[in-house]
Image (cartoon, rainbow, N blue to C red):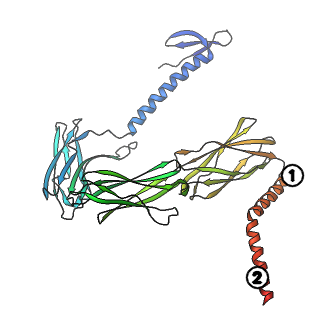
Amino acid sequence: MKDMKLYWNGNKGIVDCERGGNWVSLSRGQCRGQKSVAGAVLLVLLFVLAFSYALPPVSAFGLQHTQTKIYSDQTKHFEGEFWVVNDDHENMELEVGVEGALEDYVTLEKGKVKFMSSDEIKAVRFKIDIPESLPPGETVTYITVSQKFNADKGNVIESRIMLKHAITVYGPLPDKYIKAKLNFRENNDKVELISEVKNMGKKKISSVKTLFTVNGIEQESPIATEEKSLDVHETKLLKAELDRDKFTNGEYKVSAVTTYDGFQVETTKSMRIGKPVVEVVYFDKYFIYNQINKYIMDLENKWNQQIENVYVDVTVLKDNKTIDSFRTPSVNIQGLMIKRVSDYFDATGKPKGEYAFDMVVHFWNTYKMEKKRFYSKIISPEEYKVAEVKDDFGKLGTMMMYNIPLLILIAGGLVYIIWRLRKK
């Protein structure tokens, strides 16, 4: 792409612009704009090209037959295979491994699969010896096939592409056996706890119920569902409710113990109530004119667990016009606690008067709170001293108001002690 040349042609604001050997009369802004667009397009192309070199190659292989099912009551020794396909007809070497609950019982014929560009498909063969002590229901183990890309160039990150073949072994089911799942739902002023139970055994279950325990709330005893019967292969929902006001916003660990005809099974799961919230609850009201001021900001975590990487983006406005902005230091805040953040605000060169501080709280690198506005004033050093004294008196009055019951209790205790001493 050729550079464009500009020549003044004598008309106000008009230039002769060369494009591909042809001359046209355009405004100076139009001609420069065309040059800027051309440069931007070239920059984008260079970026895409550089980024493509930094990415690892896409997987050049696939699997045929991605799952094997084995029933332990039919066999204790199983030999199987699946196929790896060389989709792009490349020269490559793949690693084969095993992971999962039964990995010690699986034997691979080979630990590697090598392809020439002329090879289209190769088999991965395995053997599995089913252990005697197999739990009821499904047990899943995986055979992994992976391709490793080495960082042989400075701009390539070492990476690995992995595909999996699942071996699902079904253990023997007793006459009475259930499979349980745990779920939750907020329903207006109630929190509903749901135990989904399915009869996987060979006989009808005459009585099944679930007891729920929620860690982190006041609960005198586990809350129980009603008792129900369960036919073979039948699924039912066992439900119980708790008042929503027992919970603050946060995460809770729930345990569900389901009993059925003398047997029991326990499931646990984390329950999330509400949404995480961090709020700015205090910001300094006054700053000294023409100085760099230390500010104080209080952040309240209204979630019951620690929230990490909390920071605030602050926009400073005067007469509804943005004149400055800054970001607070990043902090971690414990659950249901207030954290004080301190840094510096530069008031030099800013006129006296009232300012609006729009604050947006961020955390977890993903959450963003709604904007909250505080008003503060930039004042003279003399005015600041007076305002500081008034603020201290206000804080003292507030503290005394909140502590009046405690003061009365202490005074009553002292009077009682003095009375007892005089009586002796």
Q: How many marks?
A: 2
Q: Disc 1 residue type?
A: Glu
Instruction: Place residue 47 in its image quadrant.
Output: top left
Write down the residue under mark 1.
382
Secondary element at tag 2? helix
Using the image, determine if residue 99 lies above or below residue 155.
Answer: below
Residue 289 at least partly seen:
no
In the visual, does 68 lie left or right of 26?
Answer: left
Asked if residue 111 can be seen in this view, the reply is yes
Type of residue at label 2?
Answer: Ile
Label 1: how many residues lie within 10 Å, few (<14), some (14-19) or many (20+)? few
The residue pinned by badge 2 equals 417
**If you read the primary sequence from the N terminus, does the residue marked by circle 2 or circle 1 appear first?**
1
- Residue at x-position 52% and y-position 45%: 366
Q: What quarter of the picture does the C terminus occupy? A: bottom right
Measuring from the top left, give residue 34's x and y in whole percent.
54, 19
Q: Residues within 10 Å of mark 2 (few under 14, many from 20)?
A: few
Between 362 and 13, the one lying in front of the other is: 362
Cα gap from disc 2 to disc 1, whole angstroms? 48 Å
Image spot of residue 293 (x, y percent):
75, 51
> Position of 208 compared to 324: left or right?
left
Foreground residue, 112 or 249?
Answer: 249
Residue 412's x, y, as percent?
77, 75
Towards the viewer: 196 or 253:
196
| Residue at horizontal 51 percent and vertical 26 percent from the top | 40
* Nearer the observer, 201 or 311: 201
